[in-house]
Amino acid sequence: MTPLTTRHPMHPMHLRATNMPPRNAATATAALSTGKAVLTFGTAVIVKTLPASVTVQGVAPTAFTQDSPTQITLTYAAPVVTGNVLNWPANVAEVRTRDGGYIAAFTHTF
């Protein structure tokens, strides 16, 4: 005689990432303030480390500050000026939304 086995359903907290609904990418806008790039997001974000892949004229930032849950300021070696182009690539891991989502890729000319 074979023993009976009981199958336990998976607890909702143990869902695999592949089973989770996709997160929508947050949007951002950029502005120029005293030679720095100020980014404002449509939702609260968490900055883990310096987002080196976010460039202005191909140059990575040297420092950042998180001014509020929805705003960060990026400092570059040379002041950002009118006519410079900021490039925010897709899936920047250093800046995520509070639920783990990414910021949508965009470019901005100051």
Image (spheres, rainbow, N blue to C red):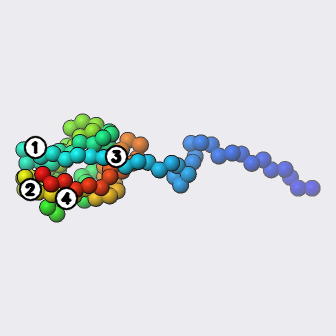
Vertical order, 86 against 8 (above or below) = below
**Which numbered disc, 4 or 2, marks the residue closer to the eye?**
2
Instruction: State the residue lying farthest toward the top.
Output: 68
Q: Which mark is residue 55?
A: 4
Amino acid type for the residue under numbered disc 3: Ala
Q: Is residue 32 left or right of residue 27?
A: left
Q: Nearer the viewer, residue 48 or 35?
A: 35
For disc 1, the marked residue is 33
Badge 1 element: strand
Vertical order, 30 against 91 (above or below) = above
Residue in view at x 27 percent, y 39 percent:
70
Instruction: State the residue lying farthest toward the bottom.
Output: 58
**Which numbered disc, 1 or 2, marks the residue closer to the eye?**
2
What distance separates the C-alpha of mark 1 from that of mark 2? Answer: 14 Å
Q: Nearer the viewer, residue 90 or 76?
A: 90
Sequence-wise, the earlier of marks 3 and 1 is 3
Sequence-wise, the earlier of marks 1 and 4 is 1
Q: How many marks?
A: 4
Sequence-wise, the earlier of marks 4 and 3 is 3
| Residues tagged 1 and 4 counted as in contact (Cβ below 8 A) | no
Residue in view at x 14 percent, y 61 percent:
57
What distance separates the C-alpha of mark 4 from that of mark 3? Answer: 19 Å
For disc 2, the marked residue is 83
Amino acid type for the residue under numbered disc 1: Ser
Q: Which mark is residue 26?
A: 3
Instruction: State the residue lying farthest toward the right.
Output: 1
Residue 65 percent across, percent down from the top left: 20, 43
